[in-house]
Image (tube, grey):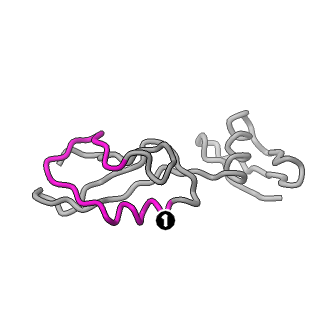
């Protein structure tokens, strides 16, 4: 049995996920907590935020993030891909840096006009 603190709302329910019983979740106050607990144990995902090189601008780095959550197990692979990116100013928020990163159907986008 795994124990988690739910982060879906500010309440912070203490969840218990029973892996041996089809990932049954207890301790949640709402249905969203049950979904979070199940997904966090079975297939955890995260929105990745980072920076990439920026040439010709006021700052040497440009903030970027994935436009949707990606599998946690792929975060290091995505970071490796970002390590090879170098943008040229000007860039605009929402501009796609890398599309379908690591086959996840998520895009890496710029988060600030620079």
Instruction: Identify the residue position indicated by label 1 in the image.
Output: 76
Query: What segment carries the magenta color?
Result: 75-98
SS type, badge 1? helix
Question: Is 58 placed left or right of 49 in the picture?
Answer: left
Please tell me whether residue 16 belongs to the stretch shown in magenta. no
Residue displayed at 31% across by 64% down: 84
Residue displayed at 50% across by 49% down: 103
User: In what quadrant of the picture does the N terminus appear?
Assistant: bottom right
Question: Is 21 placed left or right of 81 in the picture?
Answer: right
Q: Where is residue 93 in the image (x, y as percent from the top left)?
A: 26, 41
Please tell me whether residue 85 belongs to the stretch shown in magenta. yes
Instruction: Please state which of residues 83 and 24 is positioned toward the viewer in this rendering.
Output: 83
Residue displayed at 30% across by 46% down: 111
Against 80, residue 21 (above or below) is: above
Question: Is 105 placed left or right of 56 in the picture?
Answer: right
The residue positioned farthest toward the front in the image shown: 103
């Amino acid at each position: 049995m795994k124990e988690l603190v739910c982060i879906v709302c500010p309440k912070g329910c203490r969840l218990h996920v029973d892996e041996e019983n089809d990932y049954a979740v207890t301790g949640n106050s709402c249905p969203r907590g049950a979904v979070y607990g199940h997904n966090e144990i079975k297939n955890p995902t995260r929105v990745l935020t980072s920076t990439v090189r920026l040439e010709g601008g006021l700052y040497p780095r440009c903030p970027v993030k994935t436009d949707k959550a990606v599998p946690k197990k792929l975060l290091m692979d995505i970071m490796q891909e970002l390590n090879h990116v170098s943008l040229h100013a000007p860039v605009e928020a929402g501009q796609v840096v890398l599309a379908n990163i690591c086959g996840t159907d998520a895009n890496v986008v710029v988060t600030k006009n620079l």
